[in-house]
Image (tube, rainbow, N blue to C red):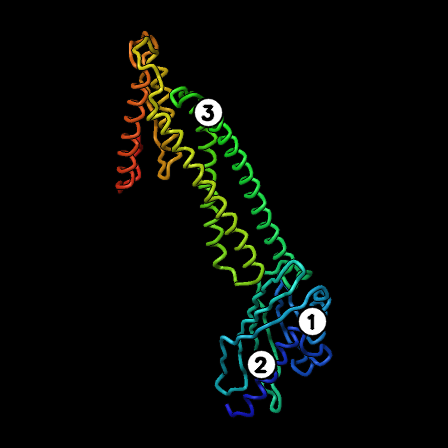
Amino acid sequence: MNLKKEELLNETYKNFCDAILLNFPKERIGELVVEDVMGYGTTIDEKIHGIEGLQDIVQRQIDQSVDFQFVNEIREIHRRYNNTENIAVIVSELKIILKLQEGNNELNVRLSTVLEDFGSQWKVTHWHGSVAVDTENDTWHQEEWKRKKKELETLVSEKTAELNNSLQELRAAQVQLIQQEKLASLGQLTAGIAHEIKNPLNFVNNFSDLSIELLDEVFLEFESIETSAAKTEIIELLNDIKSNLTKIYQHGTRADGVVKSMLLHSRGGSGTIEPTNLNEVIKEYVNLAFHGMRASKSPINVKINLALDDNIEKLMINSEDFSRLVLNFCKNAFDAMLEKVNSQSTKDYLPTL
């Protein structure tokens, strides 16, 4: 194709793109297209026929652009001619950034255009715009963007509310710990009190850890979104939330370690041998060991089977030493199960204690 002919083609194509993007007078669109030009717009089932139809859609775009400004960038990705070089097919990506009050929304449109040479001038005979827009009243994809933005704000709000609940639980756990510190010695703490402290701690640790994983999934989804001021602002907010959750998990784990240390290392009891309900001791400390494992960094699902004789009489034992024995047995068993789970090549293994 000679240089002059190509220049005329490029000029017509640029002016047509400008007309679509409201940078070319609507009244002069007839200079760029044939009388019976056929086009398919960006909304569902939007079929445009003739110059008047094209002018109508441009006018609609003008009417829907009163509340914002936008900048655009045209990137040609494909061009092809027929054998006689009098028909050209050009495919371009139109990157449109809408500057709204709520932030910047980026809209990417793929524009496919067919132009024909009529001797002294090229004209558009067919065009097709491709983007996911649901209605002709949402030409610039504002409503969909606002809906997704609202969903993200709702998600952040929900996670913030959940974080506040976790903080309340942590404060309750801290209050319980402070109250117990007022006792004369750690030996005066009973397993029942420690168990009550662990319940809110388990909630704080598990929920903060889960929330961190959910935020990581949100960050992965954000990788597919084009960079914008709104995206940067949201990522900064999510990073702050993740940092807070991490601190909650760290301090909750530390508090959990304090509770377990009191149970495992306290020697505050009398150390005497006395009649003891063995079943109750086993139930309580197996349950305590299980919840301690579930609150650790590497929890696993374990089935607990207790084969206890309901008719057993009280036994003469040192309940403090025996409870530590049960805790240590369970901890060793959980560690062995975790190692086996991590080394299993099949998925049919069910840890059972």
CA separation, marks 2 and 3?
83 Å
Distance, label 1 to label 3, CA atoms, is: 73 Å
What residue is shown with label 2? 115
In which image quadrant can residue 273 be found? top left
Local secondary structure at mark 2: strand
Q: Quadrant of the C terminus?
A: top left
Location of mark 1 (residue): 58
The numbered disc on residue 180 is: 3
Between 109 and 284, the one nearer to me in the picture: 284
Closer to the N terminus: mark 2 or mark 3? 2
Residue 71 drawn at (x, y percent): 62, 71
Q: Dividing the picture into quarters, in which one does residue 184 lie?
A: top left
Image position, residue 266 (x, y; %): 35, 24
* CB under 8 Å between discs 1 and 2: no
The residue shown at (69%, 65%) is: 68
Element assignment for label 3:
helix
Q: In the image, what residue occupies the spot 41% across and 33% down?
A: 256
Quarter of the image for residue 5 reads: bottom right
Crowding around mark 1 (Cα neighbors within 10 Å: few <14, some 14 to 19, many 20+) is some
Chain-order first, disc 1 or disc 3: 1
Residue in the foreground of this view, choosing between 237 and 352 = 237
Report x, y in % for residue 97: 60, 67
Identify residue type, mark 2. Leu
Residue situated in front as seen by the camera: 173 or 204: 173
